Image (cartoon, grey):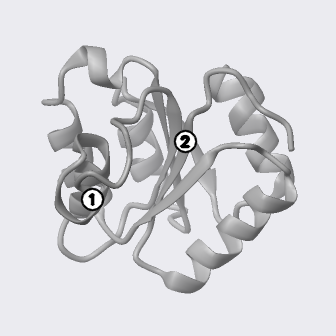
Amino acid sequence: MRKINGLDFILLVDDDEATNYLNQRVIRKADINTEVQVAGNGREALEYLTNTGKFSSAHTLPQAGLIFLDINMPGMNGWEFLEAYKELPEDQTRRIKILMLTTSINPDEERKAIDIPQVKGFIHKPLTAEKLEKAINVYVF
């Protein structure tokens, strides 16, 4: 397995179990030595980042990582997550990169995402090995 400096975790934020399963397979096949977690919505993603809820005491507070964020989810969607994420302390989010990973082909949503400083890229599903490598090499580090 290859260790990528500065990539302590990958967080998949999507309510679709099949999509999460396929994304985890892509990451596993890339042979990356990092923690991979799944959050079914924005609220669970915030719990992971703040070490609360079902993630309480399950791990150390994440340091540097990559979030693949879907837009449409129940409970707390991607846009709502981003609004809450902006309120987290900067020292906690400084080394975390967010990429929208969505089926949306709406150019307005892509423009909206790119206008949010915390969002580093907009990727169309499905996640592939090529898209993962680009995310790591271009968007993140």
* Quarter containing the N terminus: top right
Residue at screen point 13% across, 30% down: 87
Residue at screen point 59% across, 85% down: 18
Q: Is residue 127 left or right of residue 54?
A: right
Q: Does 97 sit above or below residue 54?
A: above
- The tag on residue 7 is none
Please state the horizontal and vertical placement of residue 55, each as a whole percent of the image: 29, 58
Where is mark 1, residue-wise? 42
Q: Does 106 sit above or below residue 50?
A: below
Specify the amino acid type for callout 2.
Phe
Q: Residues within 10 Å of mark 1 (few under 14, many from 20)?
A: many
Return the residue nearer the eye: 51 or 26: 51
* Quarter containing the C terminus: top right
Where is mark 2, residue-wise? 9
Q: CA–CA distance between discs 1 and 2?
A: 17 Å
**For numbered disc 2, what is the local secondary structure?**
strand
